[in-house]
Image (cartoon, helix red, strand yellow):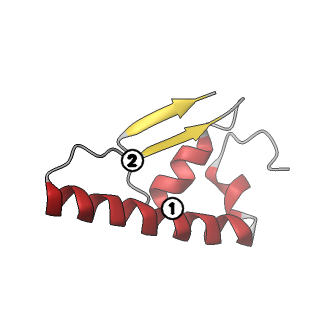
């Protein structure tokens, strides 16, 4: 679906990935706001699978903040 997933460009080629990055950025911002407002130790986890390592680069380049990297 995304080639090997070794470059951010592979993900950027799909408009739906930009939509997904926008969704995750909104969730990431909301978690940050709740953490600030409540002092709770909330963390933002984004995961990847297989060889899709540039998925993380793509998300970070699109403003998604990550506290913990998951791999499965």
Q: Is mark 1 on a helix, strand or loop?
A: helix
Q: Picture coordinates of residue 38 (x, y %)?
A: 16, 58
In terms of depth relative to the viewer, which is nearer, 61 or 35? 35
Residue 63 appearing in the image:
no
Write down the residue under mark 1.
24
What is the quadrant of the C terminus in the image? Answer: top right
Q: Is residue 61 left or right of residue 13?
A: left
Circle 2 packing at 10 Å, graded few (<14), some (14-19), many (20+), is: some
Q: Name the residue under label 2.
A: 44
Look at 53% across and 70% down and name the residue there. Answer: 22
Where is 3 relative to 63, above or below?
Answer: above
Count of numbered badges drawn on the protein: 2
Residue in view at x 38 percent, y 54 percent: 65
Q: Is 24 in front, or is 62?
A: 24
Q: In which quarter of the image is residue 17?
A: bottom right
Graded by Cα atoms within 10 Å as few (under 14), some (14 to 19) or many (20 or more), the crowding at tag 1 reads: many
68 left or right of 48?
left
Please tell me in which quadrant of the rendered image residue 68 appears: top left
- Is there any visible trace of residue 1 in the rendered image? yes
Q: Residue at x 75, y 66 (%)?
A: 14
Please tell me whether mark 2 sits on a helix, a strand or a loop: loop
| Mark sitting earlier along the chain (1/2) | 1
Question: As drawn, is 68 to the left or to the right of 55?
Answer: left
Q: In this view, does 20 lie above or below 58?
A: below
**Residue 26 image point, x, y percent:** 44, 69
Image location (x, y in percent) of residue 20: 62, 65
């Amino acid at each position: 679906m995304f080639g090997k997933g070794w470059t951010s460009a592979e993900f950027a080629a799909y408009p739906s990935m930009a939509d997904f990055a926008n969704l995750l950025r909104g969730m990431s911002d909301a978690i940050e706001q709740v953490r600030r407002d409540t002092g709770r130790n909330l963390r933002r986890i984004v995961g990847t699978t297989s060889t899709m390592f540039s998925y993380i680069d793509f998300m970070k380049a699109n403003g998604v903040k990550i506290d913990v990297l998951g791999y499965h």
